[in-house]
Image (spheres, rainbow, N blue to C red):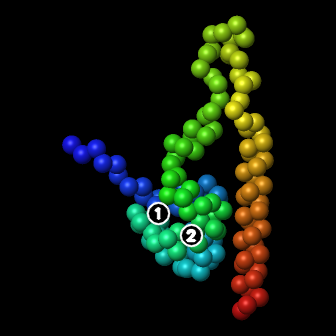
Amino acid sequence: MSTATKPKHIGRNISRIRELRGMKQEALAIAIGLSQQTVSNIEGSETIDDEKLNAIAEVLGVSAEAIKSFSDEGVINYFNTFNDSDFSNSHGAFGNHDTFNFNPVDKIVELYERLVQAEKEKVEYLEKLLKEK
């Protein structure tokens, strides 16, 4: 039995990050100058050349390395970093849940601001394309 790890499916990672960003394939395609069908094919590919990966990463607002190392488990773990292992201590029936590794509201605001900025950049890019025509 082989213990070699299966390589990450880069296309699937691109798809998940794009979905988490609330972006459609068509919007990504326009932003990188390809067809929606080509983006669909990219998302179905296990590997992608570095030039396309870097262009996609820029549009998605992440690094190419973030796409390569993305995992759904990592996203879930990121949001499950609360200290909730002890429900039977002296802090009441639900335990002491006021110890966070981060403030979830701040993270939501930060993510929202990043999404708004990404949308502004997409609008600027699309306006630039329209002016060129």
Vertically, is 51 above or below 76?
A: below
- Residue 132: in sight, yes or no? yes
73 left or right, relative to 94: left
Which amino acid, by three-letter code, is at mark 2?
Asn
- Residue 24: in sight, yes or no? no
Q: Which residue is mark 1?
A: 11
Alpha-carbon neighbours of circle 1 within 10 Å: few (<14), some, or many (≥20)? many
35 left or right, relative to 30: left
Vertically, is 98 above or below 75?
A: above
User: At 42% across and 58% down in the image, what residue appears?
Assistant: 9
Q: Which residue is mark 2?
A: 54
Percent of width and height locating residue 129: 71, 84
Percent of width and height locating residue 93: 68, 11
Which amino acid, by three-letter code, is at mark 1?
Gly
Q: Residue furthest top?
A: 90
Percent of width and height locating residue 27: 63, 71
